[in-house]
Amino acid sequence: MNIYSASSSETHNEIFDFGARYGKQIIWIGLGVLISIFLLFIESSFYEKFAAYIYLACMLLLAGLFIVGKNINGATSWYAIGSFSIQPTEFAKTGTVLALARLLNDRQFSFKPLKNRLKTFVIITIPAILITLQPDPGSALVYLSFILLFYREGLHPNILIVGISAVVLFLATLVFGYLYVIASVILVSIVVLWFISKGRKKLIRFEWPKILGIISIILGYVYSVYYLFNYVFKQRHRDRFNILLGLSDDTSDIGYNTYQSIKTISSGGFWGKGFLQGDRTQGKFVPEQDTDYIFSTIGEEWGFWGSMLVVLFFMIFILRIVFLAEKQKSTFGRVYGYGVACIFFFHVLINIAMVIGLFPTIGIPLPFFSYGGSSLWGFTMLLFIFIKLDASKNYEL
Amino acid sequence: MKKRSLLFPILIIATGIIFVTRLFFLQIIEHDSSDISLNSSTIKRIYTYPERGFVFDRNGKLMVANEQTYDVKVIPNEVKPFDTLEFCKLLKIDKDYLVHKLARAKNYSRWLPSVFLSQLSKEDYAYLQEKIYKYKGFSIQRKSLRNYPHKSSSNILGYINEVNEYLAQKNPYYEQGELVGTQGIEKEYEHLLRGTKGVEYKLRNRLNKVIGPYKEGIFDTISKPGEDLTLTIDLALQEYGELLMQNKRGGIVAIEPNSGEILALVTAPNYDPNLMVGRKKSKNSVILFNDSINKPMIDRGLQAAYAPGSPFKLIQGLIGLQENVITPSSSFYCHHGYKYASGKNNFMGCHCNIVGRPIDLRLGIAKSCNTYFANVYKRLIEKYPTPQQSVTKWAEHLHSFGLGNYLGYDLPSGRKGNIPTADYYDKIYPRKTWKFPTIISNAIGQGEIVTTPIQLANMIAAIANRGHFYTPHILKKINNQNIEIEKFTTKRHTTIDKENFTPVIDGMHDVYTNGTARHVQVKGIDICGKTGTVQNYIRKNGIKYELADHSIFVAFAPKENPKIALAIFVENGGYGSMIAAPIASLMIEKYLLGTDKLKWWEDRIINTSLEKEYNKQTSIESLEVAKK
């Protein structure tokens, strides 16, 4: 585990080359190391005992933003302390995962009772709503990733299926238009039902009200997606989706970020242009290239082999966390580890997919790479609490 | 439980594979290696433009130089509030101009420099230079403009234009907005005059601001200055020709026969080359190009294609001798004309007034006898079994003199002219019914024959050389070093044997001693010449009006070891002997002796204006009067 964090910090050092920001980031890293040492000295049972309080504190910090928050780039997400700003959003993730681990740690816990489902739902919804209100919807989306954790911990797969179908139908509606989707949904249902009725009749009982109900819910969903997209979404949201889905072709205005980012990455070629040699990076062609779009710099300066290494590093890193989480003796440790993996995975997935043009622009940082002290600290905390839990698992009952 | 824990790792691995595939696609397959070349959008090329080469005449007199002017440029985003009143006073502009120009610059780009005020004078520049530091965002850029110390030779020198989109696409050297020679020698020798621009590669950011050199400038080059050219033109002779041609339309071409060097290339009306430079250029060029009456942008010496008239008889005589249809002593009688077919109208008149005695070749040339050359042409065309064969042979001889096609001189404009061939007539008369009487006008240089003045001058040079010529050219030296261009140093032989030239040249000499040009003899020089008068018509509303004849004269001098051959063409100048012949004598005297023995003629020619004649052509009423 230590190797992972160390290597990530190393890469971090190398990548940063942005003058004043470079120096600032060094300070953040230095303080981050202190924090991680401090976290390692805390008794691991402390986290379990105080999970609820930590969560509460985080929520208060989020709520407090509405009173004394500092507005940067249109979102009130920061507490300003001198020239440094702290973004509690990044710490709220740790608090939420701790709270979830604490909740699921209960031996009697099961997703069967509605009450438990509601409890978990509330735990992740409170920070999500508070963050959305900042407004920083990108960061709020991170909380969606816990669905993987809940599935692992026994949530009925139907919910997962429903979730995935919802996303597929959503995208299909945007790409093909709602009329086609509705038509094909009806067609597919008829064909499927016909095959089932001709086959082994005992497979399902035909409860027509239920079947028709499900179909009409699907159709209603499709139509409401269409309606939401065209009448509730703002133009900039629509634009982002349209560019990504290839429905509109724009390289200057709205699609600028994605276009420049793709161009920058592909200009790197196999070997890249070398450290500090990326002319597109030096020319700051990609907006937010030291924060959300940091991966484009890696792609340009380190080329295919470098960016591939970064992707592989993240994948192995996350797999390693999942693997270690599975080995935890306590449910608390396992749930916490799984949650950490979910968060890292979601960040890496969304961020890199966005930078390489597979996903719409959603502003969330790439762990350990993007400039930003709070995010660095947030991920450090997430990770080192887990390292501590993992290190002490053998001594716990 | 175990089954469920598989989903997440599978998702992670799938994501990894998708990402690496996408990266492979972007960085290996879609990777465009030219993108990291010097064309990348991150690299800005800054050019340093060398000074354009100077141009001198054959005697080293400066014809084209450069002048430094200064443009004021502005980068709107860098402009800080300033004292507008003082600024306007400095630049001698009003406030409206300032506001308007700033708005336009902003409209173009906030980050890139735009021209705010172009071509400051040196005095204004001197004032401004001391104060420019006060005005943030404004800068001064030096620019080199063409400067002409003389008002002459605009047709030869040409002018420079901004590179248009078409050229910029066609030729990778140029970028839109740069300067390129578009006419005259500026165009022909653009590659020598312009030099090579230097280039610096700079890294720039997304706002186009330069942030430093690219790779420490290893790709940068320094500019190479343009070459200075020396022309074959004799500026004094050129200016004299322009003076003689003032208030007339036409052209003079003078060639040095033993080298093919063009000594003078006059066209009238002309324009001051300084009009096509600087701030007033676009306004002036519109006026010049739109003048469809005077057509000052046409080089009449190169582009005016007319029937050659009587000078063509010289070559008819040469061909007759070469084809053995006549000998120098062959004689014909003239009865005020030549009846070439039965019928009342089939008669070609003649003004030689030699009735009752035989006319040989020498006399025929001296007196320009139409009848004589009609007879020669009849024998030529009827020499071979069919007129097609005869015309083909005849045209071959003419082509060997450089007629009927581009000569290959080093100037960018010209016309082919026309020497009719058998094919040409077969197309006009598809049933091939044409015979000698059909094409008799050719005998005296009218009909279907069309030549340009420079072709005629070259033809005379070939006669002066007794059988060969050098392709006319205008470039003499590069950077004061003599040049050897094979094309211009190769003798081009005509199909006529040397001895056949003697009677023709004697006839031309007689033109000066006792023929149509004896009134403009120059004592001390043996000039050989030939007058020409070409009828011409204009059609208006379907009615044919006869206009005053074009006046033509060709000459070379001295008779032995000729130094100058020329062709003069004056539109509607009347008889060749009245305007064109004196001009030829004056030019020859000026070039060979530098004296003014023909002072009376000089004054007369300079003061002759044909404007009245030209004005007639533009109104039908006056044409009607002229007809009566």
Image (cartoon, coloured by chain):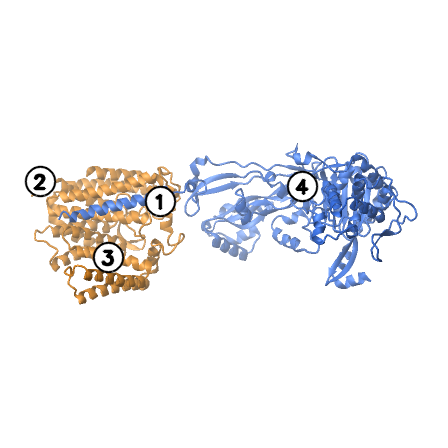
Chain colours: A orange, B blue
Crowding at mark 4 (Cα within 10 Å: few <14, some 14-19, many 20+): some
- Number of the label disc, if any, that sits on residue B26: 1
> Circle 1 — which element?
helix
Residue topped by disc 2: A395
Q: What is the distance, in whole Å, between disc 2 and disc 1 at their CAs?
A: 49 Å
Image marks 2 and 4: residues in contact by CB distance under 8 Å: no
Q: Which residue is mark 4?
A: B408
User: Is label 4 on the same chain as label 1?
Assistant: yes
Q: At numbered mark 3, what does the secondary structure look like: helix, strand or loop?
A: helix
Which numbered mark, 2 or 3, is in the foreground of this view?
3
Q: Amino acid at mark 2?
A: Tyr
Q: How far apart are the alpha carbons under marks 2 and 4?
A: 101 Å
- Asked if residue B189 can be seen in this view, the reply is yes
Residue labelled with disc 3: A165
Q: Amino acid at mark 1?
A: Leu
Label 3 – label 4 distance at C-alpha: 78 Å
Q: Are marks 2 and 1 in one subunit? A: no
Q: Position of residue A304 (x, y in %)?
A: 33, 40
A364 left or right of B306?
left
Q: Would you identify the image quadrant in which residue B37 lies?
A: top left
> As shown in the figure, which amino acid type bears the numbered disc 4?
Gly
* Label 3: chain letter: A
**Mark 2 nearby-residue class (10 Å; few <14, some 14–19, many ≥20):** few
Label 1 chain ID: B
Q: Quadrant of the N terminus of chain A?
A: top left
Mark closer to the observer (1, 3): 3
- How far apart marks 1 and 3 lie (CA) works out to 29 Å
In the image, residue B159 sits, relative to residue B227, either above or below, namely below
Residue B4, horizontal then vertical, whole percent: 16, 49
Categorize mark 1 by other alpha carbons within 10 Å: few (<14), some (14-19), many (20+): many
